[in-house]
């Protein structure tokens, strides 16, 4: 799995601040210029890992992001088509930088070293690794650090 700083994505830093003011987190932002329209796709998450994002949250983020992106792109409302959505209940984590956004959330990672899934709660992450809190059948908790180079894929645990 690769780590790409979210702030290196065009317009992410500016838009992240706007979404954060609404109590949400920006997970993903894509701005794709086309002939007539500029297509914008944003994925948001709740600031609280125990809560999911609903339609009202997406609407709130859309209302906040639209003016900011129009100003950044020097476009009018007629020049953009924007979609804001939740990460979904079984999101595949695409960028290792997302682990920080989803801290406190249950995930499973496919460890290349053991060729199997390992499930746990995200405790912390940096630009090289993620630490998960694991719980065995007896309820005993432990921590395990996964280097991103050892993770083939990762996704949310759907309960």
Image (cartoon, rainbow, N blue to C red):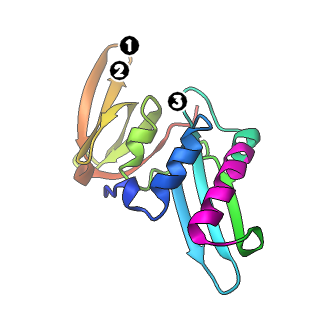
* Displayed quadrant of residue 100: top left
Residue at point 72%, 43% (across, down): 60
Question: For mark 3, what is the residue?
Answer: 49
Residue 98 on image: x %, y % = 42, 47
Residue 149 on image: x %, y % = 23, 54
For label 1, the crowd category at 10 Å Cα-Cα, with few meaning under 14, some 14 to 19 and many 20 or more, is few
Rendered view: 76 above or below 24: below
Q: Tell me if label 2 and label 1 are in contact, CB under 8 Å.
A: yes
User: Mark 1 or 3, which is nearer the eye?
Assistant: 3
Q: Is residue 25 left or right of residue 103?
A: right
Question: For mark 1, what is the residue?
Answer: 139
Mark 1 falls on what kind of element?
loop
Which of the two labelled residues, at mark 3 and mark 2, occupies the earlier sequence position?
3
Q: Main secondary structure of the magenta part?
A: helix
Query: Which region is colored magenta?
Result: 59-75
Residue at point 44%, 40% (across, down): 101
Question: For mark 2, what is the residue?
Answer: 136
For label 3, the crowd category at 10 Å Cα-Cα, with few meaning under 14, some 14 to 19 and many 20 or more, is some
């Amino acid at each position: 799995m690769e780590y790409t700083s979210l702030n290196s994505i065009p317009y992410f830093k500016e838009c992240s601040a706007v979404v954060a003011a609404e109590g949400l987190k920006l997970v993903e932002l894509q701005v794709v210029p086309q002939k007539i329209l500029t297509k914008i796709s944003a994925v948001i998450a709740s600031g609280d890992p125990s809560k999911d994002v609903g339609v009202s949250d997406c609407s709130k983020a859309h209302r906040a992001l639209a003016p900011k992106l129009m100003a950044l792109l020097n476009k009018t409302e007629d020049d953009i088509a924007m979609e804001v959505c939740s990460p979904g209940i079984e999101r595949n984590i695409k960028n290792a930088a997302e682990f920080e956004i989803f801290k406190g959330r249950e995930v499973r990672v496919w460890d290349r070293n053991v060729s199997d899934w390992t499930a746990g709660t995200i405790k912390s992450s940096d630009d090289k690794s993620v630490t998960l809190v694991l719980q065995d059948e007896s309820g005993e908790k432990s921590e395990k650090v996964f280097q991103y180079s050892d993770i083939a894929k990762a996704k949310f645990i759907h309960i």
